[in-house]
Image (cartoon, coloured by chain):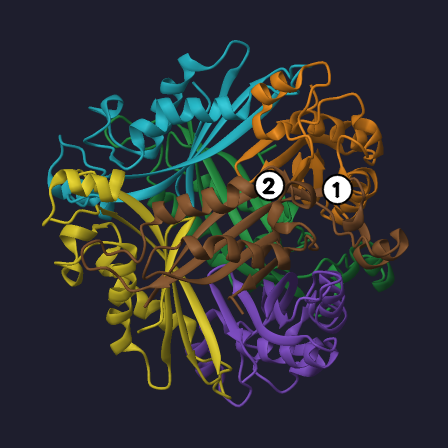
Chain colours: A purple, B green, C yellow, D brown, E orange, F cyan
Amino acid sequence: MLFLTRIEHFNAAHKLYNPEWSKEKNELVFGKCANENWHGHNYELHVTIKGEVAADTGFVINAKILSSLINDFVLEKLDHKNLNMDVPFLKGKMCSTENLAIEIWKQLLPHLPEGVQMHCIKLYETPRIFVEYFGN
Amino acid sequence: MLFLTRIEHFNAAHKLYNPEWSKEKNELVFGKCANENWHGHNYELHVTIKGEVAADTGFVINAKILSSLINDFVLEKLDHKNLNMDVPFLKGKMCSTENLAIEIWKQLLPHLPEGVQMHCIKLYETPRIFVEYFGN
Amino acid sequence: MLFLTRIEHFNAAHKLYNPEWSKEKNELVFGKCANENWHGHNYELHVTIKGEVAADTGFVINAKILSSLINDFVLEKLDHKNLNMDVPFLKGKMCSTENLAIEIWKQLLPHLPEGVQMHCIKLYETPRIFVEYFGN
Amino acid sequence: MLFLTRIEHFNAAHKLYNPEWSKEKNELVFGKCANENWHGHNYELHVTIKGEVAADTGFVINAKILSSLINDFVLEKLDHKNLNMDVPFLKGKMCSTENLAIEIWKQLLPHLPEGVQMHCIKLYETPRIFVEYFGN
Amino acid sequence: MLFLTRIEHFNAAHKLYNPEWSKEKNELVFGKCANENWHGHNYELHVTIKGEVAADTGFVINAKILSSLINDFVLEKLDHKNLNMDVPFLKGKMCSTENLAIEIWKQLLPHLPEGVQMHCIKLYETPRIFVEYFGN
Amino acid sequence: MLFLTRIEHFNAAHKLYNPEWSKEKNELVFGKCANENWHGHNYELHVTIKGEVAADTGFVINAKILSSLINDFVLEKLDHKNLNMDVPFLKGKMCSTENLAIEIWKQLLPHLPEGVQMHCIKLYETPRIFVEYFGN
């Protein structure tokens, strides 16, 4: 069993704002992240898959294929977007890095080739904060 | 003459959009950066000053004082903001990294202590694109 | 279950020196790290916690609260200190990165909010050496 | 139980080419990586071992000893080499990063001191692709 | 005047070998870099241009256009290649990082848009060695 | 004219303390950096030299020779030392990063080979603060 990780980037705007709370409570809980006019991040995304090494290629997965899958099913939907406004699969959810990682997992999972398993979605919001999701 | 650089970070939303152009021309020129609902970045800011080394401290400038100046006159105005909507000193200007670097220079310049000169504002928009401004 | 990591830094002096050994044995085992006049490092600390994502915030833990806890119970006691001389919870222990990671775990553990579990203390001594402690 | 990681680097040439396939199939599967005249990488190697912390040193393993083992049994055989042509333990295998990680594990394993266990070989091929091997 | 830098990567094989010298002299001067079967690197390329900021775009140059130029006139010729064998503009020259930087400058210079000047080619051979060329 | 930079690291203890001042004034000016029991850093040193490229080697300077010079005349004197107590060329000077950069320049300058000029000593004290010295 080998684990392979591909690192990608995307840039997006978001805000942390619970519409069921008052503006005051949002600012109390989320501080500057609740700024109504949005802020944004350069997100760094690590997608880790696992599987057996194929004898004829030496690969668990061709990294170019993995990169294409990430591009088509994740980056196309998130890069240079407003996470709260532009992303159907985040509608109705808090746009935290935690939820974003979980939804990225769900977007990619159905598209992995046979014999390859998802292991981890790791997502940096800033160089000093990241989350990891292992599927449960 | 010694050069000292302090590195800081801020997160902000922006879009590249010239209001005198059609939506089509904006998308042609700025591509995904013209997304009307904004996107955003983790900006990395390098402020470089220069001056003589003081014999009694060994400092050109106390790095904590430089950090405070950057915080008060730059980060407070930019961090977790929408560059197009929330920042008075960017009003009426294209919110490019180039213009942002020039305006950061102007914000800091009047506040440097005597004997300390501004040398360079270096600003990363993404880990692979940065600009530098030397004051003219 | 989501994992969230907050990265912090501190600077400290230390030496590796076992007082029950001769100076010669200390130098044999620890080399330059046994220099009696100390040396030091910029330590990089990764604190990883785990828990469920709250529906109303999208958070496992508010990263600002985690950062405050690390600051109050770890950085305040270690930053710009001499690990051998200034830190009560390291008294009588070898000031290795291994022991430092274990003690940081112990300092933080009692202060985590309900529903949040410690997962890992990762500590870089230099950019090329780090340790990880998972609590047992 | 503590985990300690030592990071090392080596530079090598390689190509991805299955001699049982036609040139066309190799180019179809491996793309530019099949260039018959080779290409190369700065590989970044993370060796993670685990064990108990010794009371008299505070160490799981002396990092200098681990570094020497990596140098003698891995870097000496790989650094500034052609992975396909110069490395006996890769003969007859596809020179993928996956296989390289597995073989590095095998080279190091017999030489670890008593009480120290191998935990992970992590190997970056580029700053955006890495693999991990845990021994099975 | 503003300076803008775009960072790109390429992977290549090379060796340092002066064909007018004996094998012994090559090994004496170039050490492991003279390995006849090649070795290789992940090169990191920083291209810095300078110019005035246009009022209607806020750009010195559209970073996407600069990236395309680097891709078409540099990366296409160097990425996943053998620098000694596959690159016409390096024929007859020592394949040092110094000469590579100079030749990259020459490849890009004729293609810059009007009003944009080349300022610097910075090229990392490893994370700890880089060269800079300013055109003379 | 080509510029070549070699990056090295060293670890050291120091404190910022002017013996002509009271303890109170030292703490007022230097804050935590005045801790009498020392603190320390992982310093990252960039040595940049310049010169013409030799036709027979493609080198401005052999990077291994530059690395040896830095090791013999700088790292041997600073690595795993106490900058205030163990380093003859810093005696009587404030142990600031500024002064350290100037003294490193003086240590290396007499030993550069003919045809090679010193250009810059760049020294990181932490990942967010660095100084540069160009010799005057």
- Name the residue located 57 percent from the left edge and 34 percent from the top edge: B135
- Give me the C-alpha separation between circle 2 and circle 1: 13 Å
Up-down relation of residue E2 to residue B20 (above or below) = above
| Chain containing the residue with disc 1 | D
Q: For the C terminus of chain D, give its image quadrant.
A: bottom right
Q: Looking at the picture, how far across and down is residue F43, in whole percent? A: 37, 39
Q: Looking at the picture, how far across and down is residue C83, in whole percent? A: 20, 52
Q: For the N terminus of chain D, give its image quadrant.
A: bottom left
Up-down relation of residue B65 to residue E122 (above or below) = below
Q: Between residues F2 and A35, which one lies in front from this camera angle?
A: F2
Q: Which residue is mark 2?
A: D11
SS for tag 1?
loop
Kindly tell me whether residue F29 is visible in this rendering: no
Badge number at residue A127 = none
Q: Are marks 2 and 1 in contact (CB under 8 Å)?
A: no
Task: Tell me if mark 1 has few (under 14), some (14-19) or many (20+) residues whose alpha carbon lies within 10 angstroms of its own.
Answer: many
Tell me the kind of residue under disc 2: Asn
Badge number at residue D38 = 1
| Chain containing the residue with disc 2 | D
Mark found first going from the N terminus, 2 or 1:
2
Kindly tell me whether residue F19 is visible in this rendering: yes
